[in-house]
């Protein structure tokens, strides 16, 4: 076998998923859905590409209409709606005022239940954004094309600052508030920001957390790397009170609420931007190397998130929409802020952790505000399920629509979401996409397709996915063979490039399956997503996880996710994580970490039950070397299980730097448990 053949063979990921049954969307949902006519797929068929996407752009107000829908003359640097001019802030706020001035644009829900919920109307948002834009322009001297780094938690000040930037054409780069000062510094340096916008403190997980201390660290570190931040703007969580232990540095640090007094009632004309100007940067980590600044556009991006908010999220003006993600991630940018507000929706911003003080909190918020569209991740769903399998039934919330996003969802967890959280009344969409993509790529269209637990569904209208092997040959749907998922065509929400690194952009996403770097035809430039996936005969796509999340057992590639899903078929299991451990004979073997539902005792029988489930669901090939029943998993602050840490524990290696975890103390506990036991 040639090297290439061996590689191609290795790409054949063994897929052991059982096909799940279809579940029909509730008819009450279909009756009111924006998209219930399958003709949408006819309109977005390949023969109508790229002009089909005009329909998306027409949801926006354009100061000048575009002349070219897609300019593909310099692949893979595609440009959408070329010649078009618009302002994102105008589209999300100003144009709604005549009709929706008095409507809540955002509800802000503080973590503490004894603090009142704040409703911010479109009129109030308009005022606050204009004043902040005046401050950024006149006090900081920021102008179109400049970058500014935001390190803000989930309060109203974050979208207000984002819109103020968008109004001026200033490129914002929001860093997730859970990230350290160091991570913030790297992003300041890469984007060359001379202004950092932060807050003194915020409530999270039952306490008021100092946040300004990270800004001082970030700025000191950035200076070491040669980038001088001139100003730190400090919002205050409770205006006029300062809750950080760090001193304010004279002539560098400024309280936003104080400076804003000079800009009372100021109005700033929205800057007329080109469709392909940059709206924001969103840094995302690759498996190696420094974080990549995904550089998102103005026209294509806004058109794509507005349209997918309309047809996939089905947000109508009368709905109350709550996406429980953090605005510091792309999900929050696209589906808390820009998409919903482009549609004049009411969007909920929740400061806190979902299970503080208890796992009933989200359902109390939903009851109080009448939330009827709910959007979250499998990690959060698993955590809430762990907080009480029947708990949601005790609340009177009624959802018409629910989303899951961010990782593959195990069918068992999906069914809990459907039965217990949604009470079988809410349609579910499992939306697959990435930071780089701007918006959803695969999902069912909720008023049209039946749902299938664990499957994201087919490509969205105008998105043509394909699953290929290592040689780029398409794998036939329904063949039971998995491969790498690619998107064959360009789409308006895709990032323009990686900030400052066109070469890395081409290399990471396009070089793999492009056979002719000189080709000017977009057909030769499939987008490589880096996920393993399996397509059923009906076209539904099941995402197996990152290509690097694969365990090769005896030349048989097993998705860690499918083993985890098997563990979760055991009702006592709350969470499961699978990591590869080296094995002399088989190359690698899976090792399981599982935490149990509250009240369930760890025992050898329990471990055996999990092994049996894996062997039953997948086969003896996936039999784990060991099952560790653990009190908790090491997690990032955004709640993702750190498999890297678990696999070093399994391998008897040092777990490395764990200081950025949400619960670093658990690492030592697990290490003792695992490394002190005889094998
Ligand atoms: C990776 C992208 C885009 C929103 C949040 C994550 C995984 C995302 C799904 C889904 C299975 C999913 C993929 C993807 N992923 N959505 N519905 N089913 N896996 O953004 O941090 O850029 O991560 O998340 O592996 O590549 P991100």
Image: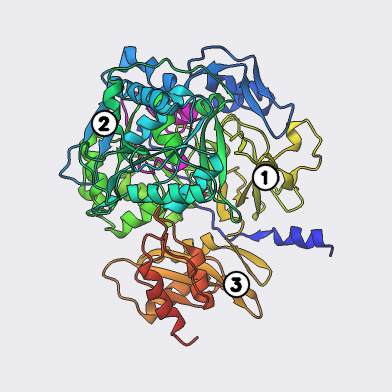
Q: Residue 307 at x, y = what percent?
A: 49, 27
The answer to which of marks 2 and 1 sits earlier in the sequence is 2
Vertical comparison of 130 with 396: above or below: above
**Which portion, as a residue range, is magenta?**
305-330
The answer to which of marks 2 and 3 sits earlier in the sequence is 2
Foreground of the two, 389 or 143: 143
Q: Which residue is mark 2?
A: 258
**330 displayed left or right of 290:** left
Q: Residue 459 at x, y = what percent?
A: 58, 38
- Label 1 CB-ligand 1 distance < 8 A: no
Q: Which residue is mark 3?
A: 621
Q: Which residue is mark 1?
A: 504
Q: Residue 493 at x, y = what percent?
A: 56, 32
Vertical comparison of 485 with 523: above or below: below
Gap in angstroms between the C-alphas marked 2 and 3: 64 Å
Is residue 543 found inside the magenta-colored segment of the image?
no
Secondary structure beneath label 1: helix
């Amino acid at each position: 076998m040639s090297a290439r053949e061996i590689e191609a063979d290795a790409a054949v990921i063994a897929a052991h998923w059982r096909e799940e049954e279809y579940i029909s969307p509730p008819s009450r949902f279909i009756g009111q859905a924006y998209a219930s006519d399958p003709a949408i797929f006819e309109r977005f068929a390949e023969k109508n590409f790229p002009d089909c996407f005009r329909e998306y752009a027409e949801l926006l107000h354009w100061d000048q209409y575009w002349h070219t829908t897609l300019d593909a003359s310099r692949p893979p640097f595609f440009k959408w709606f070329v010649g078009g001019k618009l302002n994102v802030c105008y589209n999300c706020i100003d144009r709604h005022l005549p009709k929706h001035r008095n409507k809540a644009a955002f509800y802000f829900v503080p973590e503490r239940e004894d603090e009142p919920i704040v409703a911010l109307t479109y009129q109030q948002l308009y005022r606050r954004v204009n004043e902040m834009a005046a401050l950024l322009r006149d006090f900081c001297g920021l102008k179109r094309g400049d970058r500014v780094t935001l390190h803000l938690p989930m309060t109203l000040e974050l979208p207000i600052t984002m819109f103020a930037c968008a109004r001026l054409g200033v490129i914002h780069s929001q860093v997730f508030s859970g990230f350290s000062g160091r991570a913030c510094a790297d992003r300041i340096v890469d984007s060359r920001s001379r202004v950092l916008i932060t807050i003194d403190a915020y409530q999270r997980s039952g306490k008021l957390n100092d946040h300004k201390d990270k800004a001082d660290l970030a700025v000191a570190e950035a200076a070491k790397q040669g980038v001088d931040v001139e100003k730190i703007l400090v919002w205050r969580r409770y205006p006029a009170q300062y809750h950080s232990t760090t001193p304010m540095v004279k002539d560098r640090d400024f309280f936003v609420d104080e400076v804003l007094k000079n800009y009372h009632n100021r109005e700033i004309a929205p800057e007329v931007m080109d469709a392909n100007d940059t709206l924001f940067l969103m840094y995302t980590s690759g498996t190696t190397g420094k974080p990549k600044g995904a550089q998102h556009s103005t026209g294509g991006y806004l058109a794509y998130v507005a349209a997918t908010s309309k047809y996939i999220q089905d947000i109508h003006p009368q709905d109350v929409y709550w996406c429980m993600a953090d605005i510091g991630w792309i999900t929050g940018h696209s589906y808390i802020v820009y998409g919903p507000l482009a549609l004049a929706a009411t969007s909920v911003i929740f400061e806190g952790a979902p299970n503080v003080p208890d796992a009933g909190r989200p359902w109390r918020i939903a009851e109080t505000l009448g939330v009827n569209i709910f959007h979250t991740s499998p990690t959060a769903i698993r955590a809430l399920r762990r907080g009480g399998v029947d708990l949601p039934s005790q609340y009177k919330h009624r959802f018409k629509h629910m989303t899951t996003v961010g990782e593959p969802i195990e069918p068992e967890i999906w069914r809990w979401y459907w039965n217990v959280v949604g009470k079988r009344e809410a349609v579910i969409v499992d939306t697959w996409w990435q930071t780089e993509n701007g918006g959803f790529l695969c999902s069912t269209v909720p008023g049209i397709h039946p749902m299938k637990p664990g499957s994201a569904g087919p490509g969205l209208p105008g998105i043509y996915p394909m699953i290929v092997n290592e040689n780029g040959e398409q794998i036939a749907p329904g063949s039971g063979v998995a491969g790498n998922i690619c998107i064959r065509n360009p789409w308006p929400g895709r990032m323009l490039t990686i900030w400052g690194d066109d070469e890395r952009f081409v290399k990471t996403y396009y070089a793999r399956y492009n056979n002719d770097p000189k080709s000017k035809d977009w057909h030769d430039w499939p987008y490589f997503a880096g996920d393993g996936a399996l397509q059923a005969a009906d076209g539904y796509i099941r995402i197996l996880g990152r290509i690097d999340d694969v365990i090769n057992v005896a030349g048989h590639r097993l998705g860690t996710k499918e083993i985890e899903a098997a563990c979760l078929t055991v009702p006592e299991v709350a969470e499961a994580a699978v990591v590869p451990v080296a094995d002399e004979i088989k190359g690698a073997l899976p090792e399981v970490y599982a935490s149990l539902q509250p009240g369930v005792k760890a025992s050898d029988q329990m471990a055996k039950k999990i092994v049996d489930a894996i062997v039953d669901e997948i086969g003896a090939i996936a039999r784990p070397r060991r099952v560790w029943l653990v009190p908790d998993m090491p997690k990032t602050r955004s709640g993702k299980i750190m498999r890297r840490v678990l696999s070093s524990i399994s391998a008897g290696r040092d777990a490395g730097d764990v200081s950025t975890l949400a619960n670093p103390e658990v690492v030592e506990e697990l290490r003792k448990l695992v490394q002190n036991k005889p094998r």
